[in-house]
Image (cartoon, helix red, strand yellow):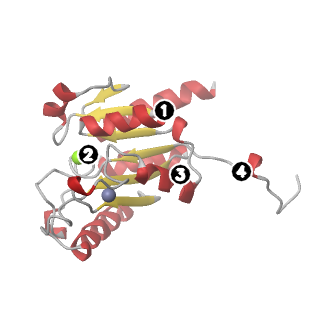
Amino acid sequence: MRKGIENSASVRHYPAVFLDRDGTLNEDTGYIDSPERLILIEGASSAIKKLNAEGFKVVIITNQSGVARGYFSQEALDAVNKKLVRILEADNAYLDGIYYCPHHPDDDCECRKPKTGMLEQAKKDLAIDLKKSYIVGDKASDVEIAHKIGGKGILVLTGMGRDEKNKLNNKPSYIADDLNDAVEWIIKGSDKSKV
Ligand SMILES: [Mg+2]
Ligand SMILES: [Zn+2]
């Protein structure tokens, strides 16, 4: 194979697992306005580690309207995300990106979930194949995004998941007890497709 020459057809596109943050990766303790309020859900690090090992891009997509509402600053949000990265890296679990929407629901931006702006941006930045990707979250809106991009949506029953289960317009591909259960399901399916 020739080195150094790639045309667009030969560029590899990666499957991704898009993760919601609050209620999925960390306990939903209301608006998380400081690093002290960030508590990881049990098994979250090892779940991400498994996705890393399977070759998935792991990307957080999170609505953080607390910024637009004036509940916390962009700097406070960055500090919370930094703490999250630090905890995960201490467990050898790695994120490929963190995307957040700081806007108010009334701003009608293109990034607030269930709009797909954050996923479109990640697709460009990280060479992601959205149709081969998964979205894991504790809200009906997370599942809705999966339907829009042609990927698979998984509802987790942590965070708001148990209430949101009754609000689903679209059927999720799987309903998981928690992130770790979701990841086990994803990995089982991707093994099957390799055979
Ligand atoms: Mg959530
Ligand atoms: Zn936005």
Query: Residue drawn at (22%, 49%), measured in percent from left and top?
Result: 41
Q: Does residue 112 appear left or right of residue 132 in this picture?
A: left
Disc 1 under 8 Å from ligand 1? The reply is no
What amino acid type should be assigned to the residue bearing mark 4? Answer: Val
Density class for disc 1 (Cα within 10 Å; few <14, some 14-19, many ≥20) is few
The residue lying furthest to the right in this view is 2
| Mark sitting on residue 11 | 4
Check whether the beta carbons of the residues at disc 4 and disc 3 lie within 8 A of each other: no
Distance between mark 2 and mark 4 Cα atoms = 32 Å
Residue 116 in picture, x, y percent from top left: 41, 46
3D distance between C-alphas at marks 1 and 4: 21 Å
Q: In the image, residue 145 lies at what x, y percent?
A: 37, 38
Q: Is mark 2 within 8 Å of ligand 1?
A: yes
Query: Real-space Cα distance between discs 3 and 2?
Result: 21 Å
Q: Nearer the viewer, mark 3 or mark 2?
A: 3
Q: Residue at x 34, y 33 (%)?
A: 154
| Residue 32, x across and y down, in percent | 16, 62
Q: Which mark is drawn over residue 150? A: 1
Secondary structure, mark 3, is helix
Image quadrant of residue 71?
bottom left
Mark 2 burial class by Cα count in 10 Å: few <14, some 14-19, many 20+: many
- Mark 1 lies on a secondary structure that is loop
Residue position marked by numbered label 3 in the rendering: 123
Tell me which numbered mark, 3 or 2, is placed earlier along the sequence.
Answer: 2
Q: Amino acid at mark 2?
A: Thr
Q: Does label 2 or label 1 sit earlier along the sequence?
A: 2
Mark 1 or mark 4: whose residue is earlier in sequence: 4
Q: Tell me which numbered mark, 3 or 1, is placed earlier along the sequence.
A: 3
Asked which secondary structure carries label 2, the reply is loop
Residue at 20% x, 74% y: name it: 73
Answer with the quadrant where ligand 2 appears in the image: bottom left
Callouts 3 and 1 close, C-beta under 8 Å: no
